[in-house]
């Protein structure tokens, strides 16, 4: 049974989330502030964390940063603040997804399922990935999409591999620019726009498949199997 840590200082929210998650077959542990949440994380080693942003002791950003220093456990952040700046801050600190309060439980449960499907992080990086419509071999530097080999430039391949290792997760512009071009590229967003357009043209080929979803002002989300998006409610 997968274990989920819920951290929120609003006890009504905590009770609601616990009931819904337990009803969906998850084991649930809770904390009422960020410091307690960090202690519970270290003690209980959950498979996923759902955390509010505005909390006493440690806020959600500080908790996310602390957890990310310890583990790659998926983190879904909840907040009443719907500003792009807040979303970007949470994602840049290491959150894997962001939901604005109020939210629907079916949507939250879909996002929980999407995050739990991600392969657990390990010290050994996978060099051969079969995910959705894609088969990617990082050693051979090859990519196959829907059974057809696709020729990619080195940077297009690096971008696709980065997406494939984080399916369903929002990757911010800053993270993508830093990962592909290093710190020198963080202030060159036009590089990313051009590279995204080029990769889309090669992997989508006008066949109606939309693998790369834009998150306006925030970043991009990769869906290796677009047909599963509606099922997941994302």
Image (cartoon, helix red, strand yellow):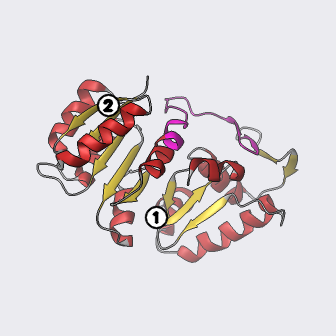
Q: Which mark is residue 200?
A: none
Residue lying at the far bottom of the rendered structure: 190
Q: Position of residue 199 (x, y in %)?
A: 72, 63
Q: Position of residue 142 (x, y in %)?
A: 79, 45
Does 191 sit above or below residue 5? below
Q: Position of residue 85 (x, y in %)?
A: 35, 71
Q: Is residue 103 visible?
A: yes
Q: Say which residue label 1 marks.
A: 174
Quadrant for the N terminus, please. top left
When asked about the image quadrant of residue 33, the answer is top left
Residue in view at x 50 percent, y 31 percent = 120
Residue lying at the far left of the rendered structure: 57
Q: Residues within 10 Å of mark 2 (few under 14, many from 20)?
A: some
| Magenta residues, start to end | 113-137
Q: Secondary structure at mark 2?
A: strand
Residue in view at x 24 percent, y 25 percent = 43
Task: Judge left or right: residue 6 versus residue 230.
Answer: left
Q: Say which residue label 2 marks.
A: 28
Q: Position of residue 22 (x, y in %)?
A: 37, 31
Q: Earlier in the sequence, mark 1 or mark 2?
A: 2
Q: Is residue 7 visible?
A: no
* Front residue of this view, candidates 97 and 14: 14
For residue 83: magenta?
A: no
């Amino acid at each position: 049974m997968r274990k989920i840590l819920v951290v929120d200082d609003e006890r009504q929210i905590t009770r609601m989330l616990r009931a819904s998650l337990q009803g969906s077959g998850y084991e649930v542990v809770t904390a009422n502030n960020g410091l307690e949440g960090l202690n519970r994380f270290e003690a209980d080693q959950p498979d996923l964390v759902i955390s509010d942003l505005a909390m006493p002791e440690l806020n959600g950003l500080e908790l996310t940063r602390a957890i990310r220093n310890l583990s790659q456990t998926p983190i879904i952040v909840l907040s009443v603040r719907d500003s792009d700046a807040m979303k970007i801050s949470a994602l840049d600190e290491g959150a894997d997804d962001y939901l604005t309060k109020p939210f629907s439980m079916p949507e939250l449960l879909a996002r929980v399922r999407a995050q739990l499907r991600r392969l657990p992080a390990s010290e050994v990086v996978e060099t051969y990935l079969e995910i959705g419509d894609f088969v990617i071999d990082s050693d051979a530097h090859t990519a196959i999409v829907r059974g057809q080999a696709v020729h990619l430039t080195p940077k297009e391949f690096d971008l696709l591999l980065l997406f494939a290792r984080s399916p369903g997760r929002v990757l911010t512009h800053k993270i993508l620019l830093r990962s592909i071009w290093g710190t020198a590229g963080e202030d060159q967003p036009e590089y990313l726009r051009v590279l995204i357009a080029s990769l889309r043209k090669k992997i989508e080929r006008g066949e109606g498949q939309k693998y790369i979803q834009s998150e306006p002002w925030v970043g991009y989300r990769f869906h290796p199997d677009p047909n599963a998006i509606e099922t997941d409610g994302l």
